[in-house]
Image (spheres, helix red, strand yellow):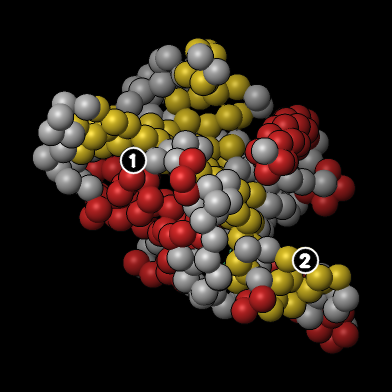
């Protein structure tokens, strides 16, 4: 599972800044590239090995992937090495992932009113929803989105900053508002204005504290489309975008605004492994189509 982070409206002066990588990525490093890719390998789950019979099979499955955290490398099948900006092995907790992969961007968003995006990308069942939303009821397992909400409120000034949230999903290539009053799912329109995409009827909700923002996150998650597949009991069948909108009133009356996109993508999937048919198959093909388009966009940004 990879966490991609991008900064959209990066000031020109920050683009060439470089600094060596530490265990916690320094703020200057975030501004040195438009896209960073951090990888998190989830631990082996009992369901991963339940069909393996012999000791050798199980041992092989457990040792198929090695993570060299200090070097940011993942080694597959002992000999193929892949390089990332940061790598986490299965023991890494939510807090460690948040502090090095997400917190610097959230800080940048609040301090400098800069557009930022965090995307969880990876194969189905690899842990994207666990990472972004959270893995249980205890506070340690809070995901990247609840933690980002907390930091946005901790870093903002209630007298000058106005925060609102929106939450939508892209399901079968159509947009749906996860916070709409109307429970009927009616697709939203997407409009392009001045080279920027707008979603005119997407509902926006003012939030004044962490708990009200979390309530919207929880509400939208309940509406989001999930289903059981051959590879994940609770597979996300849509790409979900939770957005935090920041509007800042300076004393000069100059209004500034920025958007923090927190994205839990649906996972790429192979029909053979998910055993999808009918509606699940249609969803799977739309998921793969959307991910391919996203991959092309990211490749293009990286080349600029
Ligand atoms: N770091 C982790 N530690 C413990 N369990 C994890 C971890 N990451 C994922 N899991 C477990 O693995 C399973 C699959 O995770 P999850 O649903 O987050 O995958 P996903 O990438 O969102 O899949 P999909 O693309 O199908 O939505 C879940 O049971 C989840 O609790
Ligand atoms: Mg998911």
Look at mark 2 in the image and give the residue it sits on: 82
Callout 2 secondary element: strand
Return the residue nearer the eye: 52 or 138. 138
Labels in figure, total: 2
Picture coordinates of residue 147 (x, y %)? Answer: 36, 57
Q: Residue at x 16, y 38 (%)?
A: 160
Q: Is residue 252 visible?
A: yes
Question: Which quadrant contains ligand 1?
Answer: bottom right
Q: Quadrant of residue 151?
A: bottom left
Q: Which quadrant is the N terminus positioned in?
A: bottom right
Which residue corresponds to mark 1? 113
Q: In 3D space, how far apart are the residues under numbered discs 2 and 1 (Cα atoms)?
A: 34 Å
Compared to residue 252, the image places residue 184 above or below, namely above
* Tag shown at residue 247: none
Earlier sequence position, callout 2 versus callout 1: 2
* Residue at point 58%, 29% (across, down): 170
The one of 192 and 284 positioned closer to us in this rendering: 192
Q: Looking at the rendering, which quadrant does residue 297 occupy?
A: top right
**Quadrant of image for the C terminus:** top right
| Mark 2 surroundings: few (<14), some (14-19) or many (≥20) residues within 10 A | few
């Amino acid at each position: 599972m990879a966490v991609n982070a991008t900064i959209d409206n990066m000031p020109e002066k920050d683009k060439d800044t470089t600094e060596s990588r530490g265990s916690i990525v320094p703020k200057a490093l975030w501004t040195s590239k438009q896209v960073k890719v951090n990888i998190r390998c989830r631990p082996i789950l009992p369901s991963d090995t339940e069909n393996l019979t012999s000791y050798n099979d199980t041992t092989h499955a457990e040792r198929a992937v090695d993570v060299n955290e200090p070097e940011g490398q993942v080694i597959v099948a002992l000999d193929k090495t892949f390089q990332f900006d940061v790598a986490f092995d299965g023991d890494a907790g939510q807090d460690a992932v948040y502090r090095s992969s997400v917190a610097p961007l959230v800080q940048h968003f609040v301090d400098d009113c800069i557009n930022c995006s965090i995307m969880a990308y990876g194969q189905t069942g690899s842990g994207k929803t666990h990472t972004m939303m959270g893995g249980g009821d205890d506070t340690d397992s809070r995901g990247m989105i609840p933690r980002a909400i907390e930091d946005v409120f901790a870093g903002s000034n209630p007298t000058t900053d106005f925060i609102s949230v929106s939450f939508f999903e892209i399901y079968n290539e159509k947009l749906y508002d996860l916070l709409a009053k109307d429970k009927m799912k009616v697709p939203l329109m997407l409009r392009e204005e001045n080279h920027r995409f707008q979603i005119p009827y997407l509902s926006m909700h003012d939030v004044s504290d962490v708990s009200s923002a979390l309530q919207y996150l929880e509400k939208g998650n309940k509406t989001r489309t999930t289903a059981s597949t051959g590879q994940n009991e609770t597979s996300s069948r849509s790409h979900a975008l939770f957005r935090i909108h920041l509007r800042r009133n300076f004393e000069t009356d100059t209004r500034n605004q920025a958007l923090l996109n927190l994205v839990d993508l649906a996972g790429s999937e192979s029909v053979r492994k998910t055993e999808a048919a009918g509606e699940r198959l249609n969803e799977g093909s739309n998921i793969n189509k959307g991910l391919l388009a996203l991959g092309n966009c990211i490749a293009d940004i990286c080349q600029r």
